[in-house]
Image (cartoon, rainbow, N blue to C red):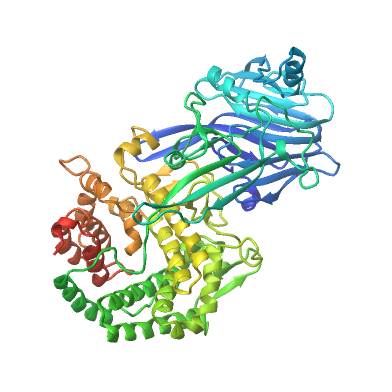
Amino acid sequence: NLIVEKGVDPIHPYPYIVYCNTNSTKIGFPKFTIAPEHVTSDMSSEWELGDASGALTQRKVTNTDALGVEVTWSGSGSAQMRSRFYKGMPFQTFELKGVTPILRTTNAIIKVEPVQRAVLSARNTEAQVTTDAADIPAMSKITLNDNSQWLVASKPEIKWKQNEGTLTQQGAYTGFVQLAHLGDQPQNNINVLQQYVGTYPIEGTVTYAQVQGSDSTGRSSNIVYVYKTNTDVDGNTKQVYNTTSASTTTQLLSFVLPHHVDKISNNTILSTGLSGYRSAKGRLTAVAGNTISYNQPLERVSFGGMRAIGDSDKERLKQQLLKDAASSTTVTAQDPYFYGKGVARVARLYQIAQEVGDKTTAAALGTKIVNLLTPWLVSMSNNDTLVYDATWGGIVSTLGISDPSQDFGQGRYNDHHFHYGYFLYAGAILAKYDINTFAPLREPMNQLLRDYANPSYADTQFPYMRHFDPYDGHSWAAGLFSFMDGRNQESTGEAINAYYSAYLYATALGFEDTAAFYEIVLNMEATSGRRYWHPMRSQSKDLYGDAFSHNTVGIVWSSKVDYVTFFGADTEFVYGIQMLPFTPATRMLIRPDWVKEAWCPDNSTCADGMKTAAQHANKNGWAQFLYSAYAMVDRNAALDNALACTPDDGNTLTNTMHWIFTNQQASANA
């Protein structure tokens, strides 16, 4: 939103909404509206900070890192304003250099009150405590006519002069300004916030610790967010405008999301701390510390199914495999998304043939995969050729780069992990079983991997992990398109497939460290998928509110959630798009307890449930996905219904059987 469509749409550094205008910035605290079909937000209380002299005339993105973005405002002279936007910061901080500050609001200012500088000091003498207090930024509590209250801090102190809804200071100023909304308990919140005023992040990194534990004890990885702040800055490496802070603590105060709270490790969650802050994903919880670490459990997944197939089921599967190998290996789609689904469909048959020991069928399918991939990746003889885009650093389709409306916007980097994840799956399966046949495809397949799942910051041709957001713990599918509600993702199942494919690919080629990294990312995507797209009813109410009581979400945005899809609002669409494609990794997203609850939520009419949706879908591919999921609860009730459906273009009856036979309820095993 900062770099396309003139950069006029807002960004969403939770808990705020921020507009970065050409000569100013607007900071809003969202009000959330919770309804049965959606959770939306708008700016109910806001401030605009700029330069009263008109010295700021342009703004640009001047730096990015793993967790945030730096924006700088400047003009023809030396005046500058700079901010670094990170999700989860209670203070929005702006460094000013030679700026005449003006702070205005569309609300009426009811009251401006100075805040006494409270000090938690270990000093012994009154003089030393007084010195500490003088080093704390000056603070004011401002009450607006919408009953909201804000903390405004500055260092050196700004002597604000009020004129109706505007606060100004005469003359150029160098220092910093911080703004923080005081939530729903202003007095309690201000007592907490003033202990951390003056400290803010200037750099963020993420580390993914090596896998710990075993299958018997539980495998996990520590995900660590490390923030460098203005209080530990080295002046030789990072310029900060006169902001050294000696506040009551130099620890950073920040918020974490619900999936962090579940597994947070070394930080103290402030049980009596800040209240009244949330994002579209639910309540934000305050933590203190420049390092935030949480434990990510790792669920093991591989090429094959999670459990052995019984003899009678295996024989039945073999017979269906022969039918599908003869009739379901032609791919006629011309675009990368549907073509990729078709190739992955054939690759699933190839993998299943290997599992059931049908080497003859497997060999024929392997040849078919090579023949399908070659026009797209080697001879480049397909109609919608893939090309390298040097401007943004990525592989795009010819039609997509010439027309943003083509190929689901993939020319502007929409859905690359969906599209190329299917190609990578086919490449991974072929590489595992026939590395020599795979050899001509290896280099172009590597390019697709680097496009959406590049694990190296040192790579100058492709960005690091294009779609993945380590703070939210999941990918955003939207590319270079600007939306008022921020970024979005619809199909979490296809996002999981993307990193599952990357993991299999690295594993097949023997890149153990890279495979370990992709395994962590895959599990993060699945964890957030279960938490935010597939919540249990009790979790849904906690995350999204009582009025929103669905078991699934269609689209998660930066600032809202919708019970709908981009292609329709039918219940089977909303459920099904979060599940496909069905592979051994799908069980990381779909859990039996969730399926049982979602199948018939009200236990009578089954309204809003998968059972009713499957019946409405009337034996099409969407119904097959829902029945396949239900096999985790009741194989016998699901199997015949699933096999009576016409498969989706990325699915087969063989794959449906394989999923059910390897994921069925244990007590119903054949």
Q: Quadrant of residue 498?
A: bottom left
x and y, in percent, of residue 75 in the image = 81, 43
Residue 190 as seen in the image, left or right of residue 549: right
Number of marks in the rendered image = 0
In the rendered image, residue 13, in percent from the top left (x then y), is placed at: 57, 40
Left or right relative to 432: residue 67:
right
- For the question of whether residue 385 can be seen, the reply is no
Rendering coords of residue 222 (x, y %): 49, 49
Identify whether 140 is placed above or below 537: above
Residue occupying image coordinates x 63% and y 63%: 392
603 to the left or right of 263: left
Residue lying farthest to the right in this orientation:
77
Q: Nearer the viewer, residue 189 or 610?
A: 189
Q: Which residue occupies 16% across, 42% down?
A: 605
Closest to the observer: 216 or 85? 216
Q: Is residue 626 above or below residue 331?
A: above
Q: Is residue 472 above or below residue 414?
A: above
Res. 65 in view: yes
Q: Residue at x 49, y 41 (%)?
A: 559
Q: Is residue 39 left or right of residue 87?
A: left
Relative image position of residue 262 (x, y in whole percent): 42, 40
Q: At 64% from the left edge and 20% from the top edge, which residue is drawn?
A: 120
Seen from the viewer's position, the closer of residues 373 and 220 is 220
The image quarter in which residue 119 lies: top right
Residue lying farthest to the top in this orientation: 126
Q: Quadrant of the C terminus?
A: bottom left
